[in-house]
Image (cartoon, helix red, strand yellow):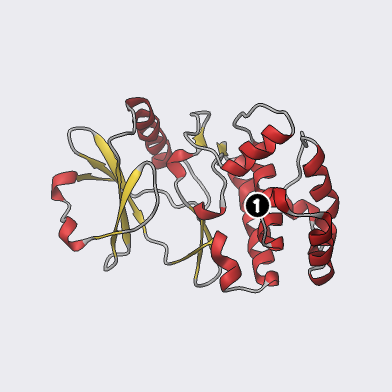
Amino acid sequence: METIKYNDIDFSKLKKLDIRSFESDIYLDYINKKVYKIFKENIDAYELTLKWEKLKILETKKVIDSIVVPDGRIVDSSFCGVREDYIDGIDLAYTKEKYSDNEILQMLLNISKDIKCIHESGIIISDLNLANIRIDKNMCHHFMDVLSYSINKLPATTTTQIILDYLKRVGKKFKISENNDKLAFLLHTIQLLVDKEFFEITDYEFEEKMERLNILRELKEIFYDLRKYYISDAPYLHELIKG
């Protein structure tokens, strides 16, 4: 992994992206297809230490190709950012604007299989949300923001709001776990396919959408279960879908 001195970066040749991020200012080098993430001053020393330790692990840890791993660490007087490949495409959250339901479903199934592989490699995503999964022009997916993950038991630094809302509704305290990753992805999947916030979907709306999208028939039982109680041993999405 390359070490890049902050003062050697020519920011005049980079475009600052208008992306809402609480932890980084993000710059694009479009010519070289690279992204520079410069950590904001509000990140405390503990979080920076976690990111540094995770980066060192990722230098030697074998991970699946769909995880975007930084290829450069940026240093000033201390560790202050990373460089990684730029993935040209759209966030999974916006795929309804471009792709059919069947195409989106195939993406979701492929992502689910990779989530299982990620778990098997000792990584928990925690902040598993549709804005952190990028879909390229070939409909391949890429997991972003890997330094926020839990890696080899080093804790995650963020989590997705949908799982926090779900746990509050079913009376469970949050903890980082593979099961909560699976639950978050199931919640996001149903929300994306129905095209409505999960906890606002009525029985009628789900049943009506199910008439037009057969795959929801296979998710019907878990949809109703998720609304009632905490599922302690959740399946992966691809384990629920036949064929």
User: x%, y% of residue 141?
Assistant: 54, 61
Whether residue 173 sits left or right of residue 131 in the image: it is right
Instruction: Evaluate whether residue 71 shows in this view.
Output: yes
| Residue beneath disc 1 | 188
**In which quadrant is the C terminus drawn?**
bottom right
Name the amino acid, label 1: His
Q: Nearer the viewer, residue 214 or 196?
A: 196
The residue sitting at 39% across, 47% down in the picture is 21
User: x%, y% of residue 98?
Assistant: 57, 74
Q: Nearer the viewer, residue 193 or 54?
A: 193
User: x%, y% of residue 133?
Assistant: 52, 55
> Count of labels shown?
1
Whether residue 215 sits left or right of residue 89 in the image: it is right
The residue sitting at 50% across, 39% down in the picture is 149
Q: Is residue 13 placed above or below 144 in the rendered structure?
A: below
The residue sitting at 76% across, 45% down in the picture is 235
